[in-house]
Image (cartoon, rainbow, N blue to C red):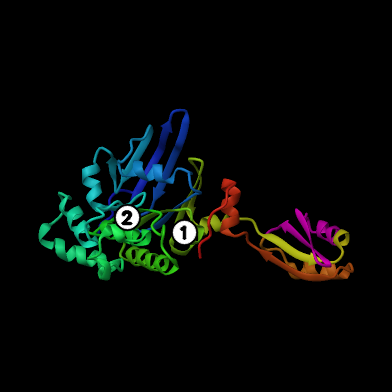
């Protein structure tokens, strides 16, 4: 596949207003070709509203959207055949089997090749692990099985871009691992994947780039490596003499921000440069008569970083 446009997906000033409330406010995203792009935020932060605008399912109040170099909604018919999507939980005919549902959906696509339909449906079902349940009525599927069927529907044709809204919703740990492996497999084929989730662990394990939403606004955007580099190192130590330890640390320009009692010792935490010579600090503390039970430099977790940005917690699924 030859990439079209500077980015696989791009928005500029994208805004959606309901009454006096901005569900999405001035959102500008750039999703590189071939990336697995995590669209992260707590529930209600504007992720699904954004996805609906990306796919032409909702009209923006203002701003622009480009999919694979095509302006949306102006060239929606050109872009959408190259885009697979799973949004807001799939809806199927409950009285039809999973297999027949996919046949019907594919037949409704005017760009679909009827001569390869049966083969493509069977292949899509196999890719998501539903071959053995293909003749079961969709109404009897569990939520996780419906999610798999929705993914199969998105994979009925070769795609350049997949937009997935909470694709592991309702899946058990094994199903989540299988979907995660499927995403990695698709990415290895050069498909760009835009993955919306409130699960930080899911984003960390499969994504190369991330955008973080909070209350409709973008609060972080970049590669995971760039975001990790944006966090500040901290010195964490446990000592017996707090006042003496603080006096020593002050000579190094270090000021603890928290002090927590831990049994017979006190845990001090202070922001520092990652290049700090912890061995020399330890020697200085011991020379001052301070007993040091532990001392290390650590980076804040991505969870802490994102919570600091949004003021809200994320579900951390491992």
Left or right of residue 225: residue 153:
left
Q: Is residue 157 in sight in this rendering?
A: no
Of 70 and 47, the residue lying toward us: 47
Q: Residue at x 56, y 46 (%)?
A: 310
Q: Is residue 258 in sight in this rendering?
A: yes
Q: Residue at x 28, y 56 (%)?
A: 160
- Please state the horizontal and vertical placement of residue 126, each as a whole percent of the image: 26, 69
Element at badge 1? Answer: helix
Asked if 192 appears above or below 185 in the picture, the reply is above
Crowd rating for badge 2 (residues with CA inside 10 Å; few <14, some 14–19, many 20+)? many
Ranked by sequence position, the earlier of labels 1 and 2 is 2
Q: CA distance from mark 1 to mark 2?
A: 15 Å
- Please state the horizontal and vertical placement of residue 29, each as a whole percent of the image: 42, 45
- Quarter the N terminus occupies: bottom left
- Please state the horizontal and vertical placement of residue 230, each as a whole percent of the image: 58, 54
Quarter of the view holding residue 166: bottom left
Quarter of the view holding residue 191: bottom left
Crowd rating for badge 1 (residues with CA inside 10 Å; few <14, some 14–19, many 20+)? many
Asked if residue 270 lies in the magenta stretch, the reply is: yes
Of 99 and 83, the residue lying toward us: 99
Of 225 and 91, the residue lying toward us: 91
Q: Residue at x 67, y 63 (%)?
A: 275
Element at badge 2? Answer: strand
Q: Which segment is the magenta one?
A: 245-273
Quarter of the view holding residue 178: bottom left
Residue beneath label 1, please? 203
Left or right of residue 40: residue 100:
left
Residue beneath label 2, please? 162
Confirm or deny contact between disc 1 and disc 2 (CB under 8 A).
no
Q: Residue at x 87, y 64 (%)?
A: 241
């Amino acid at each position: 596949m030859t990439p079209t446009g500077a980015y696989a997906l791009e928005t500029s000033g994208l805004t959606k207003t309901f009454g006096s409330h901005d569900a999405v406010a001035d959102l500008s995203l750039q999703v590189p070709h071939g990336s697995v792009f995590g669209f992260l935020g707590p529930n209600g932060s504007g992720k699904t509203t954004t996805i609906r605008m990306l796919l032409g399912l909702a009209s923006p109040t203002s701003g622009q959207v480009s999919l694979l170099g095509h302006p949306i909604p102006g060239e929606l018919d050109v872009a959408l055949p190259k885009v697979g999507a799973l949004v807001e939980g799939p809806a199927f005919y409950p009285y039809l089997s999973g297999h027949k549902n996919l046949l019907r959906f594919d037949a409704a696509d005017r760009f679909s090749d009827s001569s390869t339909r049966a083969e493509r449906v069977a292949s899509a079902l196999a890719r998501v692990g539903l071959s053995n349940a293909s003749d079961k009525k969709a109404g009897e599927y569990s939520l996780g099985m419906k999610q798999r069927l929705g993914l199969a529907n998105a994979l009925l044709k070769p795609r350049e871009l997949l937009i997935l809204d909470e694709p592991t919703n309702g899946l058990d740990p094994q199903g989540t691992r299988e979907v995660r492996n499927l995403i990695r497999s698709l990415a290895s084929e050069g498909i760009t994947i835009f993955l919306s989730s409130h699960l930080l662990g899911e984003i960390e394990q499969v994504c190369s780039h991330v955008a973080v939403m909070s209350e409709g606004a973008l609060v972080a955007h970049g590669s995971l490596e760039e975001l990790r580099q944006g966090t500040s190192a901290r010195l964490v130590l446990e000592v017996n003499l707090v006042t003496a330890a603080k006096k020593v640390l002050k000579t190094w320009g270090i000021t603890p921000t928290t002090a927590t009692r831990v049994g017979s010792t006190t845990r001090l935490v202070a922001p520092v440069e990652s290049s700090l010579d912890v061995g020399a600090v330890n020697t200085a503390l011991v020379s001052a008569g301070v007993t040091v039970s532990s001392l290390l430099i650590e980076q804040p977790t991505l969870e802490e970083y994102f919570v600091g940005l949004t003021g809200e917690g994320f579900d951390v699924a491992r």
